[in-house]
Amino acid sequence: MSSDATEADPRPLGDGHGWVDTPDEKTTRAELVARIGEQQRRVAFAVGSGLGGKVDRGQHQKQLLGAKATLRLVDSIPSPVKRGPFATACSLPVACRLSSGQPCPFADTSADVRGMALKFFSPQGSETDILATNEGGRSHARNAETFMAFADILVSRIENGTSGAVEELLKELRGDKLTVGEVSRMAAILLKEVGLHRVHSLSLESYWGSVVKLGDAAFKYSLHRHPETLPLHDSASDGPEYLRQEILHRLATGPVKWQLAVQLFVNENDTPVHDASKKWQSVPSVIGELEISSIPSEEDERIVNQMAFNPANGFDPLGITHARADVYAASARNRAGRGLLSSDAARQYLMA
Ligand code: HEM
Protein backbone atom coordinates (compact mmCIF):
# COMPACT_ATOMS: atom_id res chain seq x y z
CA MET A 1 0.00 0.00 0.00
CA SER A 2 1.28 3.44 -0.98
CA SER A 3 2.15 5.71 1.95
CA ASP A 4 1.72 8.90 -0.04
CA ALA A 5 0.94 10.25 -3.51
CA THR A 6 3.73 9.37 -5.93
CA GLU A 7 4.36 10.14 -9.59
CA ALA A 8 3.34 6.55 -10.39
CA ASP A 9 -0.02 7.01 -8.64
CA PRO A 10 -2.20 9.36 -10.67
CA ARG A 11 -4.87 9.61 -7.97
CA PRO A 12 -5.25 12.98 -6.23
CA LEU A 13 -4.15 13.33 -2.58
CA GLY A 14 -6.73 16.01 -1.64
CA ASP A 15 -6.73 18.32 1.35
CA GLY A 16 -10.07 17.25 2.83
CA HIS A 17 -11.70 20.65 2.28
CA GLY A 18 -14.56 21.89 0.08
CA TRP A 19 -17.26 19.38 1.00
CA VAL A 20 -20.93 20.19 1.58
CA ASP A 21 -22.86 18.28 4.21
CA THR A 22 -26.59 17.57 4.06
CA PRO A 23 -27.38 15.26 6.98
CA ASP A 24 -30.59 13.23 7.09
CA GLU A 25 -33.54 15.12 8.60
CA LYS A 26 -34.20 14.61 12.31
CA THR A 27 -37.47 12.84 11.51
CA THR A 28 -35.70 10.40 9.17
CA ARG A 29 -33.10 9.63 11.83
CA ALA A 30 -35.84 9.09 14.45
CA GLU A 31 -37.61 6.75 12.05
CA LEU A 32 -34.38 4.76 11.50
CA VAL A 33 -33.86 4.52 15.25
CA ALA A 34 -37.36 3.04 15.60
CA ARG A 35 -36.69 0.68 12.64
CA ILE A 36 -33.49 -0.77 14.11
CA GLY A 37 -35.36 -1.58 17.34
CA GLU A 38 -38.05 -3.33 15.36
CA GLN A 39 -35.48 -5.31 13.34
CA GLN A 40 -33.61 -6.33 16.50
CA ARG A 41 -36.85 -7.63 18.08
CA ARG A 42 -37.90 -9.48 14.92
CA VAL A 43 -34.53 -11.21 14.65
CA ALA A 44 -34.47 -12.05 18.37
CA PHE A 45 -37.79 -13.89 18.04
CA ALA A 46 -37.12 -15.49 14.63
CA VAL A 47 -36.94 -19.23 15.27
CA GLY A 48 -33.83 -19.87 13.15
CA SER A 49 -31.81 -16.91 14.44
CA GLY A 50 -30.60 -18.80 17.51
CA LEU A 51 -30.98 -15.67 19.65
CA GLY A 52 -33.68 -17.22 21.86
CA GLY A 53 -35.83 -14.09 22.08
CA LYS A 54 -32.99 -11.92 23.46
CA VAL A 55 -32.27 -8.75 21.50
CA ASP A 56 -28.69 -8.54 20.20
CA ARG A 57 -26.64 -6.27 17.87
CA GLY A 58 -28.79 -4.87 15.05
CA GLN A 59 -26.00 -5.76 12.59
CA HIS A 60 -22.67 -7.63 12.88
CA GLN A 61 -23.97 -9.95 15.60
CA LYS A 62 -21.46 -12.77 15.06
CA GLN A 63 -18.10 -12.00 16.63
CA LEU A 64 -15.32 -13.78 14.76
CA LEU A 65 -12.60 -12.56 17.11
CA GLY A 66 -12.50 -10.12 20.04
CA ALA A 67 -9.01 -9.14 21.15
CA LYS A 68 -6.92 -6.55 22.89
CA ALA A 69 -4.44 -5.19 20.35
CA THR A 70 -1.97 -2.32 19.83
CA LEU A 71 -2.38 0.66 17.54
CA ARG A 72 0.82 2.50 16.57
CA LEU A 73 0.31 5.90 14.95
CA VAL A 74 3.19 7.35 12.93
CA ASP A 75 4.33 10.98 12.98
CA SER A 76 3.91 11.56 9.24
CA ILE A 77 0.11 11.89 9.24
CA PRO A 78 -1.29 14.26 6.55
CA SER A 79 -1.60 17.68 8.22
CA PRO A 80 -5.38 18.17 7.60
CA VAL A 81 -6.12 15.17 9.87
CA LYS A 82 -3.16 15.41 12.26
CA ARG A 83 -5.42 16.37 15.15
CA GLY A 84 -7.79 14.83 17.72
CA PRO A 85 -7.08 11.08 18.00
CA PHE A 86 -4.41 11.33 15.23
CA ALA A 87 -2.59 14.38 16.70
CA THR A 88 0.54 12.62 17.94
CA ALA A 89 2.65 9.61 17.11
CA CYS A 90 1.94 7.05 19.85
CA SER A 91 1.31 3.42 20.70
CA LEU A 92 -2.06 2.70 22.28
CA PRO A 93 -3.99 -0.31 23.58
CA VAL A 94 -7.02 -0.95 21.39
CA ALA A 95 -9.99 -3.33 21.42
CA CYS A 96 -10.48 -5.11 18.10
CA ARG A 97 -13.74 -6.85 17.17
CA LEU A 98 -13.89 -8.79 13.91
CA SER A 99 -17.39 -9.76 12.84
CA SER A 100 -19.76 -11.01 10.16
CA GLY A 101 -22.30 -8.42 9.01
CA GLN A 102 -25.73 -9.97 9.51
CA PRO A 103 -27.94 -9.57 12.60
CA CYS A 104 -27.68 -13.26 13.61
CA PRO A 105 -24.97 -15.90 13.21
CA PHE A 106 -24.56 -17.87 9.99
CA ALA A 107 -21.82 -20.27 8.91
CA ASP A 108 -18.64 -18.47 7.79
CA THR A 109 -19.02 -20.25 4.44
CA SER A 110 -22.21 -18.27 3.79
CA ALA A 111 -21.66 -15.01 1.85
CA ASP A 112 -21.48 -12.00 4.15
CA VAL A 113 -19.82 -8.66 4.76
CA ARG A 114 -16.97 -8.91 7.31
CA GLY A 115 -16.29 -6.04 9.67
CA MET A 116 -13.61 -4.67 11.91
CA ALA A 117 -14.35 -2.38 14.87
CA LEU A 118 -11.61 -0.73 16.95
CA LYS A 119 -11.93 1.21 20.21
CA PHE A 120 -9.15 3.22 21.81
CA PHE A 121 -8.69 6.21 24.10
CA SER A 122 -6.50 8.90 22.58
CA PRO A 123 -3.59 10.39 24.60
CA GLN A 124 -5.99 13.32 25.28
CA GLY A 125 -8.49 10.78 26.64
CA SER A 126 -11.23 10.87 24.01
CA GLU A 127 -13.02 7.62 23.20
CA THR A 128 -12.42 6.83 19.53
CA ASP A 129 -14.00 4.10 17.42
CA ILE A 130 -13.05 2.97 13.93
CA LEU A 131 -15.65 0.88 12.07
CA ALA A 132 -14.90 -0.60 8.70
CA THR A 133 -16.14 -3.32 6.34
CA ASN A 134 -14.57 -5.30 3.49
CA GLU A 135 -16.98 -4.11 0.77
CA GLY A 136 -14.23 -2.88 -1.57
CA GLY A 137 -14.14 0.72 -0.32
CA ARG A 138 -17.88 1.33 -0.44
CA SER A 139 -21.17 0.30 1.11
CA HIS A 140 -23.85 -1.59 -0.79
CA ALA A 141 -26.19 1.31 0.16
CA ARG A 142 -26.04 4.94 -1.00
CA ASN A 143 -27.50 6.22 2.28
CA ALA A 144 -28.89 5.18 5.64
CA GLU A 145 -32.49 4.85 4.44
CA THR A 146 -31.67 2.41 1.64
CA PHE A 147 -29.30 0.54 4.00
CA MET A 148 -32.18 0.00 6.42
CA ALA A 149 -34.63 -0.91 3.63
CA PHE A 150 -32.19 -3.64 2.54
CA ALA A 151 -31.75 -4.74 6.16
CA ASP A 152 -35.57 -5.12 6.38
CA ILE A 153 -35.40 -7.61 3.50
CA LEU A 154 -32.62 -9.59 5.21
CA VAL A 155 -34.64 -9.64 8.44
CA SER A 156 -37.68 -11.05 6.58
CA ARG A 157 -35.45 -13.81 5.18
CA ILE A 158 -34.22 -14.59 8.70
CA GLU A 159 -37.84 -14.78 9.89
CA ASN A 160 -38.50 -17.24 7.07
CA GLY A 161 -35.75 -19.51 8.36
CA THR A 162 -32.90 -18.87 5.88
CA SER A 163 -29.50 -20.40 6.52
CA GLY A 164 -27.83 -17.25 5.13
CA ALA A 165 -29.88 -14.17 4.15
CA VAL A 166 -27.21 -12.47 1.97
CA GLU A 167 -26.33 -15.81 0.30
CA GLU A 168 -30.00 -16.38 -0.53
CA LEU A 169 -30.45 -12.91 -2.06
CA LEU A 170 -27.30 -13.30 -4.14
CA LYS A 171 -28.58 -16.63 -5.51
CA GLU A 172 -31.78 -14.88 -6.58
CA LEU A 173 -29.77 -12.13 -8.26
CA ARG A 174 -27.74 -14.72 -10.17
CA GLY A 175 -31.03 -16.37 -11.21
CA ASP A 176 -32.43 -13.00 -12.42
CA LYS A 177 -35.20 -13.12 -9.84
CA LEU A 178 -34.24 -9.88 -8.05
CA THR A 179 -35.02 -6.94 -10.27
CA VAL A 180 -36.57 -4.20 -8.14
CA GLY A 181 -34.46 -1.05 -8.86
CA GLU A 182 -32.49 0.02 -5.79
CA VAL A 183 -32.69 -3.42 -4.13
CA SER A 184 -31.11 -5.15 -7.12
CA ARG A 185 -28.49 -2.38 -7.33
CA MET A 186 -27.50 -3.04 -3.68
CA ALA A 187 -27.54 -6.79 -4.20
CA ALA A 188 -25.35 -6.35 -7.32
CA ILE A 189 -22.74 -4.45 -5.25
CA LEU A 190 -22.85 -7.19 -2.63
CA LEU A 191 -22.51 -9.85 -5.34
CA LYS A 192 -19.37 -8.15 -6.71
CA GLU A 193 -17.72 -7.21 -3.41
CA VAL A 194 -18.88 -10.10 -1.22
CA GLY A 195 -20.42 -12.95 -3.26
CA LEU A 196 -17.62 -13.16 -5.83
CA HIS A 197 -14.88 -12.30 -3.36
CA ARG A 198 -13.82 -15.34 -1.33
CA VAL A 199 -12.36 -14.46 2.06
CA HIS A 200 -9.53 -16.86 2.84
CA SER A 201 -8.34 -15.00 5.92
CA LEU A 202 -9.57 -11.96 7.85
CA SER A 203 -5.91 -10.94 8.03
CA LEU A 204 -5.65 -10.64 4.23
CA GLU A 205 -8.72 -8.41 3.89
CA SER A 206 -9.00 -4.63 3.55
CA TYR A 207 -11.72 -2.81 5.49
CA TRP A 208 -13.04 0.73 4.82
CA GLY A 209 -15.13 3.13 6.93
CA SER A 210 -17.71 5.72 5.88
CA VAL A 211 -16.90 9.44 5.67
CA VAL A 212 -16.02 11.35 8.89
CA LYS A 213 -14.40 14.68 9.70
CA LEU A 214 -11.61 16.09 11.90
CA GLY A 215 -11.64 19.90 12.03
CA ASP A 216 -12.63 20.95 8.49
CA ALA A 217 -11.09 17.92 6.80
CA ALA A 218 -13.38 15.17 5.49
CA PHE A 219 -11.79 11.74 5.11
CA LYS A 220 -12.29 7.99 5.16
CA TYR A 221 -10.12 5.60 7.14
CA SER A 222 -9.30 2.06 6.08
CA LEU A 223 -7.28 -0.98 7.19
CA HIS A 224 -5.19 -3.04 4.79
CA ARG A 225 -3.20 -6.24 4.79
CA HIS A 226 0.23 -5.63 6.28
CA PRO A 227 3.13 -6.45 3.91
CA GLU A 228 4.36 -9.00 6.49
CA THR A 229 1.03 -10.91 6.36
CA LEU A 230 1.16 -13.62 3.73
CA PRO A 231 -1.35 -16.25 2.56
CA LEU A 232 -1.08 -19.59 4.38
CA HIS A 233 -1.20 -22.81 2.43
CA ASP A 234 -2.04 -25.16 5.29
CA SER A 235 -5.36 -23.71 6.47
CA ALA A 236 -8.83 -24.92 5.47
CA SER A 237 -11.35 -22.44 4.10
CA ASP A 238 -14.42 -24.49 4.81
CA GLY A 239 -16.38 -25.34 7.93
CA PRO A 240 -18.86 -23.05 9.71
CA GLU A 241 -16.17 -21.34 11.86
CA TYR A 242 -13.26 -21.36 9.40
CA LEU A 243 -12.60 -17.60 9.57
CA ARG A 244 -12.13 -17.70 13.32
CA GLN A 245 -10.07 -20.88 13.17
CA GLU A 246 -7.81 -19.45 10.49
CA ILE A 247 -6.95 -16.31 12.45
CA LEU A 248 -6.46 -18.28 15.69
CA HIS A 249 -4.12 -20.56 13.75
CA ARG A 250 -2.08 -17.53 12.65
CA LEU A 251 -2.04 -16.04 16.15
CA ALA A 252 -0.74 -19.33 17.57
CA THR A 253 2.51 -18.73 15.69
CA GLY A 254 2.87 -14.94 15.74
CA PRO A 255 1.24 -11.52 15.55
CA VAL A 256 -1.28 -10.45 12.92
CA LYS A 257 -1.04 -6.88 11.62
CA TRP A 258 -2.86 -4.43 9.35
CA GLN A 259 -1.92 -0.95 8.12
CA LEU A 260 -4.24 1.94 8.98
CA ALA A 261 -4.68 4.51 6.20
CA VAL A 262 -6.68 7.67 5.47
CA GLN A 263 -8.04 9.08 2.20
CA LEU A 264 -8.81 12.80 2.04
CA PHE A 265 -11.82 14.42 0.38
CA VAL A 266 -11.03 15.94 -3.05
CA ASN A 267 -14.41 16.79 -4.59
CA GLU A 268 -17.94 15.36 -4.67
CA ASN A 269 -17.25 13.52 -7.92
CA ASP A 270 -14.06 11.64 -6.92
CA THR A 271 -14.76 11.33 -3.21
CA PRO A 272 -18.54 11.61 -2.68
CA VAL A 273 -19.82 12.55 0.76
CA HIS A 274 -23.41 11.93 -0.33
CA ASP A 275 -23.21 8.50 -1.91
CA ALA A 276 -21.67 5.84 0.31
CA SER A 277 -21.95 3.24 -2.48
CA LYS A 278 -19.13 4.89 -4.47
CA LYS A 279 -15.47 4.08 -3.88
CA TRP A 280 -13.24 7.09 -3.10
CA GLN A 281 -10.59 7.83 -5.73
CA SER A 282 -8.07 9.77 -3.60
CA VAL A 283 -4.75 8.13 -2.72
CA PRO A 284 -4.54 6.46 0.71
CA SER A 285 -1.78 7.54 3.13
CA VAL A 286 -0.63 5.03 5.74
CA ILE A 287 -0.88 6.56 9.24
CA GLY A 288 -0.31 3.60 11.50
CA GLU A 289 -0.27 -0.08 12.23
CA LEU A 290 -2.62 -2.38 14.14
CA GLU A 291 -1.21 -5.49 15.78
CA ILE A 292 -2.91 -8.39 17.55
CA SER A 293 0.02 -10.11 19.21
CA SER A 294 -1.45 -13.38 20.47
CA ILE A 295 -4.59 -15.48 20.91
CA PRO A 296 -7.06 -13.51 23.07
CA SER A 297 -8.28 -14.98 26.36
CA GLU A 298 -11.93 -15.99 26.80
CA GLU A 299 -12.28 -12.97 29.09
CA ASP A 300 -10.96 -10.60 26.38
CA GLU A 301 -13.40 -12.08 23.86
CA ARG A 302 -16.33 -11.67 26.27
CA ILE A 303 -15.47 -8.09 27.19
CA VAL A 304 -14.89 -6.95 23.60
CA ASN A 305 -18.20 -8.53 22.56
CA GLN A 306 -19.98 -6.35 25.14
CA MET A 307 -18.53 -3.11 23.79
CA ALA A 308 -20.64 -0.53 21.98
CA PHE A 309 -18.87 0.99 18.96
CA ASN A 310 -20.09 4.17 17.31
CA PRO A 311 -18.59 5.86 14.22
CA ALA A 312 -19.17 9.27 15.84
CA ASN A 313 -16.85 8.49 18.80
CA GLY A 314 -13.66 10.53 18.30
CA PHE A 315 -14.67 11.97 14.90
CA ASP A 316 -17.32 14.39 13.66
CA PRO A 317 -19.92 12.66 11.52
CA LEU A 318 -20.56 13.62 7.91
CA GLY A 319 -22.97 12.28 5.25
CA ILE A 320 -24.28 8.79 6.12
CA THR A 321 -22.37 8.83 9.43
CA HIS A 322 -24.87 11.27 11.02
CA ALA A 323 -27.67 8.71 10.85
CA ARG A 324 -25.30 5.87 11.73
CA ALA A 325 -24.38 7.68 14.96
CA ASP A 326 -28.01 7.64 16.15
CA VAL A 327 -28.77 4.11 14.94
CA TYR A 328 -25.69 2.52 16.61
CA ALA A 329 -26.50 4.22 19.91
CA ALA A 330 -30.07 2.88 19.72
CA SER A 331 -28.91 -0.62 18.77
CA ALA A 332 -26.55 -0.66 21.76
CA ARG A 333 -29.27 0.60 24.18
CA ASN A 334 -31.74 -2.00 22.90
CA ARG A 335 -29.32 -4.89 23.51
CA ALA A 336 -28.22 -3.78 26.99
CA GLY A 337 -30.01 -6.81 28.48
CA ARG A 338 -27.22 -9.03 27.11
CA GLY A 339 -24.59 -7.00 28.97
CA LEU A 340 -23.19 -3.75 27.62
CA LEU A 341 -19.79 -2.33 28.59
CA SER A 342 -19.92 1.37 29.51
CA SER A 343 -17.31 3.79 28.12
CA ASP A 344 -15.72 4.04 31.59
CA ALA A 345 -15.48 0.26 31.90
CA ALA A 346 -13.98 0.06 28.39
CA ARG A 347 -11.40 2.71 29.35
CA GLN A 348 -10.47 0.82 32.54
CA TYR A 349 -10.16 -2.46 30.65
CA LEU A 350 -7.94 -0.98 27.93
CA MET A 351 -5.78 1.09 30.26
CA ALA A 352 -5.29 -1.72 32.82
C1 HEM B 1 -19.88 2.26 5.05
C2 HEM B 1 -20.90 2.11 5.91
C3 HEM B 1 -20.84 1.20 7.11
C4 HEM B 1 -19.79 0.57 7.72
C5 HEM B 1 -18.33 0.61 7.30
C6 HEM B 1 -20.31 -0.16 8.85
C7 HEM B 1 -19.54 -0.94 9.70
C8 HEM B 1 -20.00 -1.59 10.83
C9 HEM B 1 -19.23 -2.44 11.68
C10 HEM B 1 -17.76 -2.79 11.50
C11 HEM B 1 -20.04 -2.88 12.68
C12 HEM B 1 -19.67 -3.84 13.81
C13 HEM B 1 -19.44 -3.08 15.10
C14 HEM B 1 -19.14 -4.05 16.22
O1 HEM B 1 -18.27 -4.92 16.06
O2 HEM B 1 -19.81 -3.94 17.26
C15 HEM B 1 -21.33 -2.30 12.47
C16 HEM B 1 -22.42 -2.51 13.29
C17 HEM B 1 -23.63 -1.93 13.09
N1 HEM B 1 -24.03 -1.20 11.98
FE1 HEM B 1 -22.84 -0.54 10.47
N2 HEM B 1 -21.65 0.05 8.92
C18 HEM B 1 -22.02 0.87 7.89
C19 HEM B 1 -23.28 1.35 7.62
C20 HEM B 1 -24.36 1.22 8.46
C21 HEM B 1 -25.61 1.89 8.30
C22 HEM B 1 -25.96 2.86 7.16
C23 HEM B 1 -26.41 1.51 9.34
C24 HEM B 1 -27.82 1.91 9.65
C25 HEM B 1 -28.28 3.13 9.48
C26 HEM B 1 -25.65 0.59 10.17
C27 HEM B 1 -26.09 -0.02 11.32
C28 HEM B 1 -25.33 -0.80 12.16
C29 HEM B 1 -25.80 -1.32 13.45
C30 HEM B 1 -27.18 -1.14 14.02
C31 HEM B 1 -24.73 -2.02 14.03
C32 HEM B 1 -24.71 -2.73 15.39
C33 HEM B 1 -24.37 -1.70 16.46
C34 HEM B 1 -24.34 -2.27 17.87
O3 HEM B 1 -25.36 -2.80 18.35
O4 HEM B 1 -23.29 -2.16 18.53
N3 HEM B 1 -24.40 0.44 9.61
N4 HEM B 1 -21.30 -1.52 11.33
Image: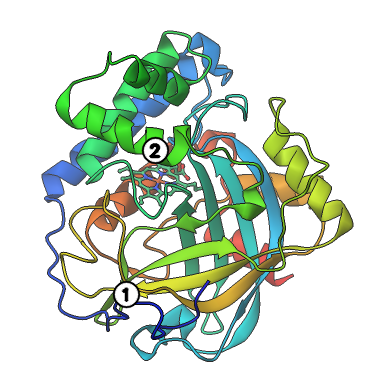
Q: Which mark is residue 236?
A: none
**Residue 291 vs residue 153: left or right?**
right
The x and y percentages for residue 110 are: 56, 25
At horizontal 57% and vertical 88% (from top left) the residue drawn is 89
Task: Residue under label 2, please give it.
Answer: 192
Separation of marks 1 and 2 at Cα, in angstroms: 23 Å
Q: Is mark 1 within 8 Å of ligand 1?
A: no
Asked where in the image residue 243 lies, by quadrant, the reply is top right
Which type of secondary structure does the marked residue at label 1 adopt?
loop
Q: Residue at x 48, y 39 (%)?
A: 113
Disc number placed over residue 11 in the picture, else none: 1
18 versus 339 height, above or below? below
Rate crowding at label 2 as few (under 14), some (14 to 19) or many (20 or more) other CA atoms within 10 Å. some
Residue 151 in view, yes or no: yes
Q: What residue occupies the far front of the structure in this picture? A: 8
Residue 108 image offset from top left, x and y in percent:
62, 30
